[in-house]
Image (cartoon, helix red, strand yellow):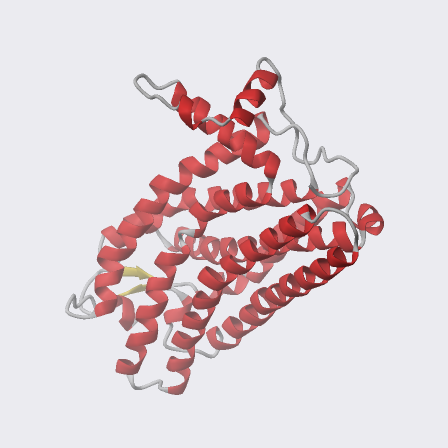
Amino acid sequence: ANETLCDLDTHQGLPVVQLYVMPSFFLAVLILGLPLNLLSLWVYFHRLRRWTRSTVFLFNLTLADTAWLLALPFLIHYHLERLYWKLGLPLCTAVRMLYHNYFYLSIFFVTCVSVDRYLAIVHPLRSLVLLGRRKTCLLCAAVWAATLVLSIPVARMTIVQTCPGSNRTVCTLYVLLSETGESLPYSIFCSTVAFLLPLLSICYCGLRSVRELRRRPGPHHKQRRLRRVLSAALVLFALFYLPYHLSRNAAVVMRAVYPDDHASWGPPDLAFALEMCFCSLITCVNPLFSCFIGRQFREDFHYTFTLMFSQCPGMQVASLISKRTRMTVKKRQGMSTVTPVCALPASGSQ
């Protein structure tokens, strides 16, 4: 059985993280992230009047966040039960696949937003043909399908094992498997194809777009907006995705290089466990990323948020509503703004 999950000596760092830090972190993320993402979905369906390509990508990012958050209680229960998995192999496989699948959905949709801005600035006419309404929806479906296919090896490497000397069953994580014949090439492949390539794409699109805007005369608000998109995407990659891939690959490589020295596995395993906690915060950050990127979504989200709290007795939030938001409230009273996901305008992104 997986010794890393079976040894729960709380005098070591990894069991402390697994038994106490991870369930606490996941519970806090669930309490904070689920309302934020549900509110974002409500804004998309009921307040947003005009759907651009970037809006569709951000909407799919919110869907991925919400799906992962709804599965998070299973992981919380597992860690609170001292790594005792009682729900069978199919659900264990589904939870492990969902975590891996969601992580790369987040990366791909953030990349799509950056590429969309690049096409709208550098190739504005061609972008209308390359990414029309139908093609944008098909691209989103392709991203979901590609990440699902990418996560299939996780299902094959996920097993439920019984710890020696007890009847406790553990839901294995492929990164912590003793045998690295499959996990090492798979982890490196995912890091290269699904992380490094999107990162290089974001950098290329951002630099080309900034150069193009500098050559054009006129106001520089588009340049500032693009820099904001690029900086937000790079911050997400630097804070969440890069440390996660470094710690994950380090944990697998140490098992491959030192298969019999279990003590050497400890530091990278601990770093990876902490990164799993930290990366769960992405579900709370992505709604803020949507607000940061899209001006229309930001105004609608702010309007809905302040309106909700203004209904609470004793809550005085009128001072928080800006003059622009108050004007928006007056304009939208009595208006129905439900828009289907694929009801995209023929124009480019916002």
Task: Tell me if I can see residue 85 in this picture.
Answer: no
Identify the residue shown where x is 77% and y is 48%: 218
Looking at this rendering, what residue extends furthest in the left direction? Answer: 11
Q: Nearer the viewer, residue 286 or 320?
A: 320
Residue 14: x, y in percent? 25, 67
Q: Is residue 302 above or below residue 74?
A: above
Residue 184: x, y in percent? 48, 76
Q: Nearer the viewer, residue 119 or 189?
A: 119
Q: Nearer the viewer, residue 277 or 138?
A: 277
Identify the residue shown where x is 35% and y is 21%: 316
Q: Nearer the viewer, residue 54 or 181?
A: 54
Tell me the quarter of the picture where residue 132 sits.
top right
Looking at this rendering, what residue extends furthest in the top direction? Answer: 334
Q: Is residue 249 above or below residue 29?
A: below
Tell me the quarter of the picture where residue 160 sits.
bottom left
Identify the residue shown where x is 69% and y is 51%: 117
Q: Quick one: quadrant of the C terminus?
A: top right
Residue 109: x, y in percent? 60, 52
Task: Tell me if I can see residue 74 in this picture.
Answer: yes
Number of marks present in the image shown: 0
Residue 46: x, y in percent? 57, 25
Identify the residue shown where x is 57% and y is 21%: 327
Left or right: 316, with 102 as reference point: left
Left or right: 54, with 91 as reference point: right
Q: Quick one: quadrant of the N terminus?
A: bottom left
Q: Is residue 112 above or below residue 182?
A: above
